[in-house]
Image (cartoon, grey):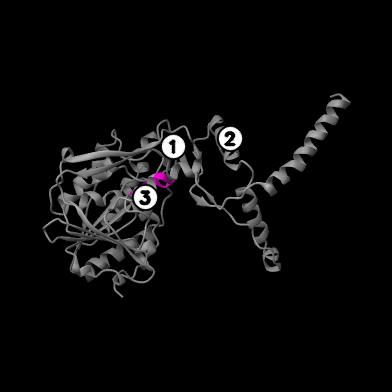
């Protein structure tokens, strides 16, 4: 290398060293990353205790990483390099030819048994007929799409063994075979951890029979494609943009029961709505919230179904796109999300007021849930 080239290289290197901090200091800092669907780290406060326990340097490193100029482009470049070198697992997400699939770890089975026992105790304590459905996720249905020998939780085995521990007072709804039979159809989102509206309908067809009713036939629904650019939680984790965006559908029953009132209670305040669809979310990152809105402690749905039947659902977010189908069969549906209940469910409902109670969780959530076993079911 000539002396001029050395000088030029030195000047360029020095310019980068000087310019990058300047760009960082004066660049606009966001508090939220829409693409990753998460809050970004805040600049940590400098104090003696934070320095001494090394938490300040740890938090500062996170802040600098989160707010590095053009960070998303750098992350995507790193992901592209990983893919080029043959890496299939990025931030806990397997990248396949047609969809993103979450890697699930073996759960703590002793903790899972505590959740099962809590549901058994609920069924023994209350007069309501109790049903439990642990829904497989896409990782359980499309395990054959994963790289050979890729470690993955056997969901069929996990669901089966969990359900074997339910008491005779709990009616198990098994939809695994239903979803396997439908696997060639669009039953799970490609970029998100939820099932699609059609996937929820497939689960509904099986479950409503065990709940004692007959499913509404597919041709009685009008299907509206409300979004064709949904990229959900899996995309946010790995930022892989080569998987086709997802379509969100809303099923509306022709000449069916209609919603008359929706009460949403976050544990602090109560708001009334006239629909279970929150269309404003279609313009936001988490478009799945079009179903039931944001997760909250309690929702009460009333319909004009003239049968007096009442259902209590204790659930995770898989229920959000499943509930619309149930509105054709019940005059009232109460919905509890234990993640947001700070005291007892009895602050919102008395389970004995409902003929049936359905516990609905996906396998991934049920495997890791910390709320069922400590829930205030009785106090």
- Indicate which label's residue lies in the foreground, 2 or 1: 2
Position of the C terminus by quadrant: bottom left
- Along the line of sight, which residue is nearer the eye, 56 or 270? 270
Who's the residue at 66% across and 63% down the image?
A: 45
- At 38% from the left and 63% from the top, the residue drawn is 340
x and y percentages locating residue 156 in the rendered image: 31, 46
* Few, some or many residues within 10 Å of mark 1 (<14, 14–19, 20+): few
Q: Which residue is mark 2?
A: 77
- Magenta residues? 283-290
- Which residue, as the protein is rendered here, is positioned at the far bottom? 379
Q: CA distance from mark 3 to mark 2?
A: 30 Å
Is residue 31 something that shows in the picture? yes
**Image height of 338 relative to 34, above or below:** below
Q: To which residue does mark 3 refer?
A: 289
Marked residue nearer the N-terminal end (2 or 1): 2
Q: Which residue is mark 1?
A: 149
Question: Does residue 89 lie above or below 53 as drawn?
Answer: above
Element carrying mark 2: helix
Instruction: Point out the residue furthest to the left here.
Output: 307
Residue 55, by quadrant, is bottom right
Q: Which type of secondary structure does the marked residue at label 3 adopt?
A: helix
Per the rendering, the mark at residue 20 is none
Q: Are marks 2 and 1 in contact (CB under 8 Å)?
A: no
Tell me how far mark 1 sits from mark 3, CA to CA: 35 Å
Q: Is residue 56 left or right of residue 316?
A: right
* Nearer the observer, 118 or 273: 273
Percent coordinates x, y for residue 309 in the rendering? 14, 60
Task: Point out the image quarter for the N terminus.
Answer: top right
């Amino acid at each position: 290398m000539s002396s001029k080239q050395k000088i030029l290289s030195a000047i360029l290197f020095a310019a980068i060293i000087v310019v990058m901090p300047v760009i960082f200091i004066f660049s606009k800092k966001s508090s939220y990353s829409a693409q990753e669907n998460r809050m970004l780290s805040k600049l940590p406060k400098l104090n003696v205790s934070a320095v001494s326990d090394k938490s300040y340097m740890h938090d500062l490193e996170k802040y600098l990483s989160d707010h590095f100029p053009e960070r998303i482009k750098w992350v995507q470049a790193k992901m592209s390099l990983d893919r080029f070198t043959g890496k299939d697992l990025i931030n806990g997400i397997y990248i396949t030819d047609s969809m993103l699939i979450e890697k699930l770890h073996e759960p703590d089975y002793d903790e899972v048994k505590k959740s099962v026992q809590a549901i058994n105790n609920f069924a023994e304590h209350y007069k309501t007929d109790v049903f439990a459905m642990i829904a497989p996720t896409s990782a359980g249905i499309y395990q054959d799409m994963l790289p050979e020998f890729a470690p993955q939780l056997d969901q069929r085995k996990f669901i089966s063994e969990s359900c074997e521990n339910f008491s005779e007072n709990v009616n198990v709804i098994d939809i695994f075979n239903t979803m396997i039979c439908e696997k060639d159809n669009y039953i799970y989102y490609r970029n998100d951890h939820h099932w699609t509206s059609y996937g929820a309908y497939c689960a509904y067809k099986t479950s409503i029979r065990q709940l004692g009713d007959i499913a509404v036939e597919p041709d009685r629904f009008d299907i509206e494609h409300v979004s064709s650019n949904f990229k959900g939680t899996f995309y946010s984790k790995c930022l892989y943009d080569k998987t086709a965006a997802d379509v969100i559908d809303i099923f509306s029953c022709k000449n069916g029961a209609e919603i008359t009132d929706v009460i949403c209670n976050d544990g602090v305040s109560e708001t009334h709505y006239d629909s279970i669809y929150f269309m404003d979310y279609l313009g936001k990152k988490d478009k799945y919230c079009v179903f039931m809105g944001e997760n909250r402690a309690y929702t009460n749905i009333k319909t004009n179904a003239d049968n007096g039947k009442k259902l209590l659902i204790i659930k995770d977010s898989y229920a959000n796109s499943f509930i619309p189908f149930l509105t054709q069969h019940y005059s009232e549906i109460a919905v509890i999300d234990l993640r947001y209940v700070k005291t007892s469910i009895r602050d919102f409902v008395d389970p004995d007021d409902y003929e049936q109670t359905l516990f609905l969780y996906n396998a991934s959530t049920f495997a890791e849930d910390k709320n069922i076993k400590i829930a205030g079911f009785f106090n």
